Amino acid sequence: MRLVLLGLPGAGKGTQGEQLAEKYSIPHISTGSLIRSVINSGLKLGEIVNAYISKGNLIPDELMMEMLRQRVLADDCRNGWILDGFPRTVKQAMHLDETLKQESSKLDRAFDIRISPQEAVLRITKRRVCRNCGQIYSLEQDLDQESGNCTSCGGPLYQRPDDNVEVAQHRLQVYMEQTHPVVHYYAQSGRLTSINGEQDIDAVFSDLSDAVAVLLQKSKDGGRA
Ligand SMILES: [Zn+2]
């Protein structure tokens, strides 16, 4: 199953991506984890990427595509993958299609996890992160009631400097300008499913799982995965 998760920052792509990855035993590839793994790989590509990051520059499209190409060709991606945070632009989406075509492969589905811009800002500003283990919390979630600390490791929670209203609104604007057209790109080619992202996490996951089950059934009926 080769899937793309789209949605505003705060829509829950990371959480849903991880759960889907676990359910279908395929890797969840976020832009962040991809960049970290390439930098830590010790490969030449890692040095090049690190040079961009350390100067605070954006990684050019071509380089992102090459990183992604190498990643999806890895052994653990034989049964598919879930992309989260990529493609970020229509150009990248077209490039991804081209790359997959060269490998005689294709994207199965893009999911748009929909939340309103107001909800996105609210979620981003309520987000807290464990300083020890990196677990992400919302202020409304059940934290350790007495200490307000991380429920899995007990570590202290903090708010990332980027998770404030101004930065959140800027990120939404960038998303609407650059990434929202990707939603249309997949819709126009009949490969998009919209999911209501304002339900609770389990209901969103259930909708996603149902949609994936339909895809699996179709590919079975079609005679090939
Ligand atoms: Zn923790």
Image: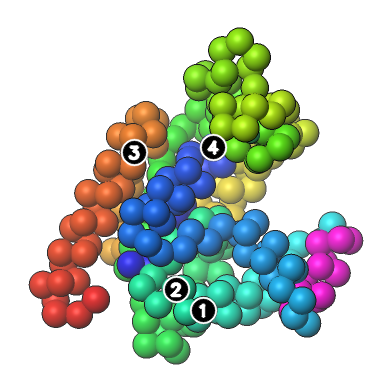
Query: Residue placed farthest to the right in the image?
Result: 55
> How many marks overall?
4
> Do the residues bearing badges 3 and 4 touch, measured as CB atoms within 8 Å?
no
Measured in 3D between alpha carbons, the distance from the residue under mark 4 to the one under mark 1, in whole angstroms, is: 29 Å
**For the magenta stretch, what is the residue range?**
45-55
Measured in 3D between alpha carbons, the distance from the residue under mark 2 to the one under mark 3, in whole angstroms, is: 24 Å
Measured in 3D between alpha carbons, the distance from the residue under mark 3 to the one under mark 4, in whole angstroms, is: 13 Å
**Which residue in the structure is indicated by mark 3?**
204
**Which residue in the structure is indicated by mark 2?**
77
Neighbour class for label 1 at 10 Å: few (<14), some, many (≥20)? few
Task: Work out which quarter of the rendered image holds the N terminus and state it.
Answer: bottom left
- Left or right of residue 224, residue 143 in this image: right
Secondary structure beneath label 1 = loop
Mark 1 or mark 3: which comes first in sequence? 1
The answer to whether residue 49 is magenta is yes
Measured in 3D between alpha carbons, the distance from the residue under mark 4 to the one under mark 2, in whole angstroms, is: 26 Å
Pair 4/1: label in front: 1
Please give the name of the residue rendered at 27% of the width and 49% of the height, measured from the top-left corner: 209
Tell me the kind of residue under disc 4.
Gly
The answer to whether residue 164 is magenta is no
> Do the residues bearing badges 1 and 2 touch, measured as CB atoms within 8 Å?
yes
Mark 2 or mark 3: which comes first in sequence? 2
**Residue at disc 2, CB closer than 8 Å to ligand 1:** no
Q: Is residue 212 above or below residue 208?
A: below
Secondary structure beneath label 2 = helix
Q: Report x, y in % for residue 35.
A: 68, 64
**Which residue in the structure is indicated by mark 1?**
74
Please give the name of the residue rendered at 63% of the width and 79% of the height, measured from the top-left corner: 66
Q: Nearer the viewer, residue 113 or 36?
A: 36
> Do the residues bearing badges 1 and 3 touch, measured as CB atoms within 8 Å?
no
**Which residue in the structure is indicated by mark 4?**
10
Q: Report x, y in % for residue 170.
A: 69, 39
